Image (spheres, helix red, strand yellow):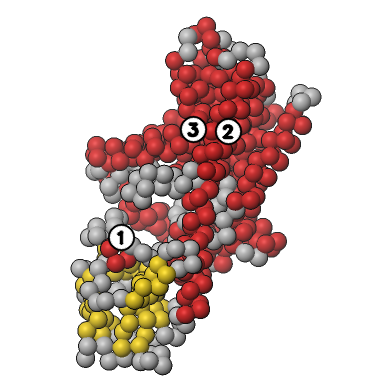
């Protein structure tokens, strides 16, 4: 490491971590966040604790860190915060190894200030940690490719751990690993392969054993894939509509992840060859082999949530840093980089969740984090204060959070589709149509002779119409919940078109 290296590494790490600390979420942000929190109590991928393929090393890490925090959300968020700093450092080291100090620092600043990466550094999901493991593995693989064969075993260990945190990552990076070790001797390669197998077995065996073996695990994986890929995968007959659906999400998420670095990234793709000296074909090939497998999968099979782009996004950020350095000479690259970083910071810090109104696009920004916490905390406070669980049931779309935070309440779970069918809204764990009474729900009427059916989410009435007048509860943060009162002798009649209260 050059003399500047340790100071730069420490500065990048601390600056990234400190920038995340003020904006940490207080409530589990995502449905999958709840899955991971429940998996910390009891691991079982058959019931999505967590969702397949399992993320077993991430769950083990969360359990270990929770010995310090004793709070699932705080544990996972702090892992994201620290992992964000590590990811930025590893991208700096990778850029410096492939080019020079300026490219490494430019790419690191682009990643640290990316509004999408910043967002995922504040929430309880494994994507920031996965990014750090991707970049550590890629940095080591590049050095192996360049002849530092002594780093083969650390690279294999990193890949094996990355696979235990998120198995898809190991699959996506396997072509790059094969490309990087092409010049390694057979004996050394055999030893590394044996080491990799041992590391992967240390998490794969407990993972499959937890569901009864490899066969049941693969069946669980198949059922899970069918749930989400029926309308997106060309292998399941989705055709061009599936590809276009995936591409639209992939392009939008990538553009937002790049943010202001999109301009130098674009310039890097069109710069004349004379400006790209020091960017030989071998580096283009390395970046392409790194990014292409995941890009193909997300295009042809399934594109999920936005954090999935981090497996390839740093390759584009490196290209952007190269474009910036080659185009702007002397000290001006740092001025340009500072301006671009400032734009990114403003995007994350100042732009509202729906900048074009409630019907426009939704951006993952600081406002989104605040709104998510307020959404749940306001509702939880009102429910605990005014609607005791002995006299109230909750009708919810976001019912998974209620299972975790309010397990004492009776839940009527509603699922919008797809992947559920029909694609409007169907009751989950209810009959297709029928009636419910207070006795059916196991609730006792209050002093006035009623139980409360609280419509937890504002979208419930529009998705699943209520044909009986409701009461409106105004929340402290400005939202609202509606309440349907059901008398002791009345019935809640429901079908796929909605619900209503009927007298005896």
Q: Residue at x 36, y 40 (%)?
A: 249
Q: Residues within 10 Å of mark 2 (few under 14, many from 20)?
A: few
Q: Residue at x 28, y 41 (%)?
A: 242
Residue 51 visible at all: yes
In the image shown, does 445 or 162 lie closer to the viewer?
Answer: 445
Q: Residue at x 48, y 63 (%)?
A: 477
Question: Which quadrant of the rendered structure holds the N terminus?
Answer: top right
How many labels, in total? 3
Residue 191 visible at all: no
Residue 211: x %, y % from top left: 47, 62
Q: From what the image shows, is residue 450 above or below residue 335?
A: below
Q: Residues within 10 Å of mark 3 (few under 14, many from 20)?
A: many
Between label 1 and label 3, give the one nearer the viewer.
3
Residue 342's disc number: 2
**In which image quadrant can residue 117 be found?**
top right
Q: From what the image shows, is residue 460 above or below residue 156?
A: below
Q: From what the image shows, is residue 302 above or below residue 47?
A: above
Residue at which label 3 appears: 258
In the rendered structure, the answer to whether residue 59 lies left or right of residue 418 reads right
Query: Regarding mark 2 in the picture, which secondary structure is present there?
Result: helix
In the image shown, does 476 or 247 lie closer to the viewer?
Answer: 476
Q: CA distance from mark 1 to mark 3?
A: 31 Å
């Amino acid at each position: 490491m050059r003399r500047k290296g340790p100071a730069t590494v420490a500065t990048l790490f601390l600056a990234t971590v400190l920038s995340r600390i003020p904006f940490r979420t207080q409530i589990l942000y995502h449905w999958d966040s709840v899955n991971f929190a429940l998996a910390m109590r009891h691991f079982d991928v058959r019931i999505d604790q967590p969702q397949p393929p399992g993320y077993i090393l991430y769950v083990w890490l969360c359990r270990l860190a929770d010995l310090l925090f004793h709070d699932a959300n705080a544990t996972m968020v702090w892992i994201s915060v620290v992992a964000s700093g590590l990811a930025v450092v590893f991208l700096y080291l990778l850029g410096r190894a492939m080019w020079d100090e300026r490219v490494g620092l430019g790419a690191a600043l682009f990643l640290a200030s990316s509004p999408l990466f910043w967002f995922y550094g504040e929430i309880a999901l494994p994507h920031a940690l996965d990014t750090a493991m991707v970049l550590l593995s890629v940095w080591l693989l590049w050095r192996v490719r360049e002849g530092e064969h002594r780093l083969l075993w650390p690279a294999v260990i990193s890949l094996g751990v990355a696979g235990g945190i998120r198995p898809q990552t190991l699959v996506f990076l396997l072509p790059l690993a094969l490309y990087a070790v092409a010049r390694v001797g057979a004996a050394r390669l055999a030893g590394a392969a044996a080491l990799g197998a041992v590391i992967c077995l240390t998490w794969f065996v407990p993972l499959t054993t937890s569901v009864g073996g490899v066969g049941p695990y693969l069946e669980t994986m198949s059922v899970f894939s069918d749930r989400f890929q029926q309308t997106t995968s060309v292998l399941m007959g989705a055709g061009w509509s599936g590809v276009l659906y995936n591409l639209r999400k992939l392009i939008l998420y990538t553009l937002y992840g790049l943010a202001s670095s999109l301009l130098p990234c674009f310039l890097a793709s069109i710069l004349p060859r004379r400006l790209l000296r020091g960017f030989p074909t071998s580096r283009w090939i390395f970046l392409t082999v790194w990014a292409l497998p995941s890009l193909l999968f997300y295009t042809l099979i399934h594109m999920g949530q936005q954090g999935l782009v981090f497996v390839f996004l740093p390759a584009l950020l490196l290209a952007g840093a190269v474009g910036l350095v080659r185009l702007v000479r002397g000290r001006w690259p740092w001025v340009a980089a500072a301006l671009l970083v400032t734009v990114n910071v403003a995007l994350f810090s100042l732009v509202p969740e729906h900048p074009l109104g409630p019907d426009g696009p939704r951006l993952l920004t600081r406002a989104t984090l605040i709104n998510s916490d307020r959404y749940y905390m306001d509702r939880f406070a009102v429910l605990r204060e005014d609607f005791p669980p002995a006299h109230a049931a909750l009708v919810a779309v976001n019912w998974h959070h209620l299972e975790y935070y309010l397990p004492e309440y009776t839940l009527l779970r509603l699922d919008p589709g797809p992947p559920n069918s029909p694609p409007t809204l169907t009751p989950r764990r209810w009959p297709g149509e029928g009636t419910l009474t207070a006795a059916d729900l196991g609730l006792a009427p209050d002093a006035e002779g009623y139980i409360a059916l609280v419509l937890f989410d504002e979208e419930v009435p529009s998705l699943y119409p209520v044909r009986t007048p409701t009461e409106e509860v105004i929340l402290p943060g400005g939202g609202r919940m509606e309440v349907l009162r059901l008398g002791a002798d009345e019935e809640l009649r429901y079908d796929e078109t909605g619900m209503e209260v009927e007298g005896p």
